[in-house]
Image (cartoon, helix red, strand yellow):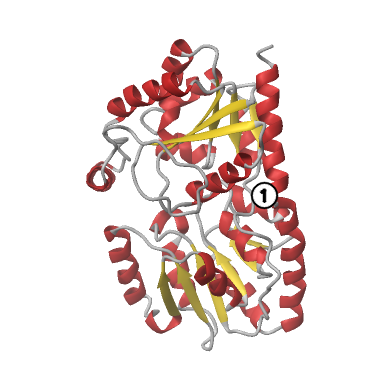
Amino acid sequence: MINVTFAVRSIDMGGAQRVTSRIVNQLDLDDKFTITMYSSEKSESFFPLNITPTFPTKPIKRVDMVVHRVIEKASFLFFKKKKNTYPSLGRIKEDFFNYIINTKPDIVVLQEQFILFMEDLKIEFPNIKFIYWAHNNIDMLREKYFCETEQLLLDSFQKCDAVVSLTDYDDKKISNFTQKSYRIYNPLTMDISSEHSKLDKKIISFVGRIDIPHKGIDYLVEIASMIPADWKISIAGSGNFFSMHKFQKLINKYNAKDKIIYKGKLQDKDLSEHYLNSSIFIHTSRWEGFPLVLMEAMNYGLPIVAFNNTGSNEALSYGEMGLLIKNGDRDSMVKEIVKLSNNHNLLESHQKKSLNQVQNFSIEKITIEWKNLFTTIMSDAD
């Protein structure tokens, strides 16, 4: 029996949360593993979760996160620099260490801010194996999310028993800092669908957080204003107050109100219908670790048109399984959308590519890779 703890920032809505819940639930089905979870933010799980997480005795409150984001915005606005202000980190550290003492895991899978505890974790718990699961592109981790603690991040990589990234690109870069770098793709986060788009709706779907720079929402709205007159873009996702305000300003700027159908946050049946009721999926992110939404869209047989970044590049097999456009090139993306919209045979051809590609990311296949990693690092202790 191997006892594995996942240490996460939150169990609310988000790509990392979605894939973590999927992996955790699948591992929990195996009698060879005991799975637990520690979340620094207390909330109801947005996604189905078969285990009950543990929260700090004084968990981070939503208001703390709002203040945190306000400081980040102000720092970037006035100093053009992202301030690393993750709230109450010291308080979480003490509580998290007590949690480990009480639960005695064999392996701890760390996410997000927990990597900053790595040096002290190895001193305090030398017999426990620690894995860092990097959910974002390594360049963005260094330049954006850990910009003020970059050296600590890189030093922590060396102290980990494994660092798991989502693409070959990230694996290669991380291997410059540790020999224990592994690449495990994210799995499809829903069951393989027997229903596929009929490709008969003049709707382009988008799924993603309303995060202007990261998800390229400014690109998305501009593209909406340029697509054929009888087509629209249906958007599923939500964002904070600042992002939603800017989103509305962009819609007004590009006169795109009649070209966008905004649906807000969707899940389960509503999300499935969102995909099925469209004929093309568009992905406008400036950067990604490994975009789960591409897997979901392909699961429903949607042709993919995506800006090229390290995540979409590998998810689409370097352009073999979807249309990759130079990042930020809105004109070229619209041209490809026009080609697809005028040619049903071309839509069907790309649908077949999507359905073939998604088979490579089944939850069963990806979970086996995680189990193999756990077994490997535990055998290294012998």
Whether residue 114 is visible to the viewer of this picture, yes or no, is yes
Locate residue 340 relative to residue 88 in the image: left or right: right
Placement of 31 over or under 307, stated as above or below: above
Seen at 43% across and 59% down, the residue is 209
Element at badge 1?
A: helix
Whether residue 151 is visible to the viewer of this picture, yes or no, is no
x then y, percent, for residue 177: 58, 23
Q: Which residue is mark 1?
A: 363
Quadrant placement of the C terminus: top right
Seen at 52% across and 61% down, the residue is 284
Q: In this view of the protein, which residue sits in the foreground, 147 or 367?
A: 367
Placement of 100 over or under 276, stated as above or below: above
x then y, percent, for residue 94: 32, 22
x then y, percent, for residue 246: 31, 64
Placement of 192 over or under 2, stated as above or below: below
Residue furthest to the bottom? 230
Seen at 43% across and 78% down, the residue is 260
Q: How many numbered discs, if any?
A: 1
x then y, percent, for residue 254: 38, 76
Placement of 374 over or under 119, stated as above or below: below
Locate residue 301 relative to residue 28 in the image: left or right: right
Q: Quadrant of residue 90?
A: top left
Q: Quadrant of residue 375?
A: top right
Locate residue 25 relative to residue 379 in the image: left or right: left
Amino acid under disc 1: Ile
Q: In this view of the protein, which residue sits in the foreground, 106 or 50?
A: 50
Seen at 66% across and 38% down, the residue is 30
Q: In this view of the protein, which residue sits in the foreground, 274 or 233?
A: 274
**Label 1 Cα crowd, 10 Å radius (few <14 / some 14-19 / many 20+):** many
